[in-house]
Amino acid sequence: MSKTETEKLVTDLRTIAHDAEKILISSAEAAGEKAYDVKEKIMSAFDTTKVSVKNIENQAMQAVKSTDSNIRKHPYQSIGIALGVGTVIGVLAARHQMK
């Protein structure tokens, strides 16, 4: 997953969480005390999810930086590996189409 794709994924997850949070707040205000209790439980789950998303973002960014560093240190080996993996995928795809 590229850095741009990772950033877009994290942005999309944040947008979804933010929109869901707004919906929960507005619906809890309209429905009363029972809805408030449910809202609190869901908000707690959202807080946990936000922490998880942040951890995923950090791990993804570390992986992207590590991969970038390795490719820059070993450009010819990286090209060779990419060529090999591409060839294997091409052969497998060709076999799959023949069946």
Image: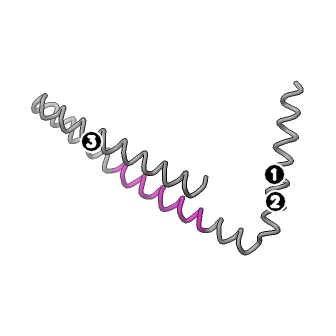
Q: Is residue 80 above or below residue 15?
A: below
Amino acid type indicated by mark 1: Val
Left of 26 or right of it: where is 5?
right
Amino acid type indicated by mark 3: Glu
Residue matched to label 3:
21
Task: Kindly report the distance in space between the C-alpha atoms of the residues bearing marks 2 and 1.
Answer: 6 Å
Q: Position of residue 67 (x, y in %)?
A: 65, 65
Q: Residue 51: name its quadrant.
A: bottom left
Near mark 3 (Cα within 10 A), the count class, few <14, some 14-19 or many ≥20, is some
Mark 2 or 3, nearer chain start: 3
Residue matched to label 1:
85
Q: Residue 43: name its quadrant.
A: top left
Left of 50 or right of it: where is 81?
right
Label 1 sits on a secondary structure element that is: helix
Taking depth in this image into account, of 40 and 13 the one nearest to the observer is 13
Amino acid type indicated by mark 2: Ile
Residue at 15%, 36% in the rendered image:
36
Taking depth in this image into account, of 44 and 26 the one nearest to the observer is 26
Label 3 sits on a secondary structure element that is: helix
Task: Kindly report the distance in space between the C-alpha atoms of the residues bearing marks 2 and 3.
Answer: 44 Å
Residue at the outermost front position: 4
Q: Position of residue 60 (x, y in %)?
A: 54, 58
Residue stretch rendered in magenta on the structure: 48-65
Q: Quadrant of the C terminus?
A: top right
What is the number of the mark on residue 81? 2
Residue at 88%, 33% in the rendered image:
95
Residue at 70%, 72% in the rendered image:
72
Left of 61 or right of it: where is 88?
right
Near mark 2 (Cα within 10 A), the count class, few <14, some 14-19 or many ≥20, is few
Residue at the outermost left position: 32
The answer to the question of whether label 2 and label 1 lie on touching residues, with beta carbons closer than 8 A, is: yes
Left of 7 or right of it: where is 30?
left
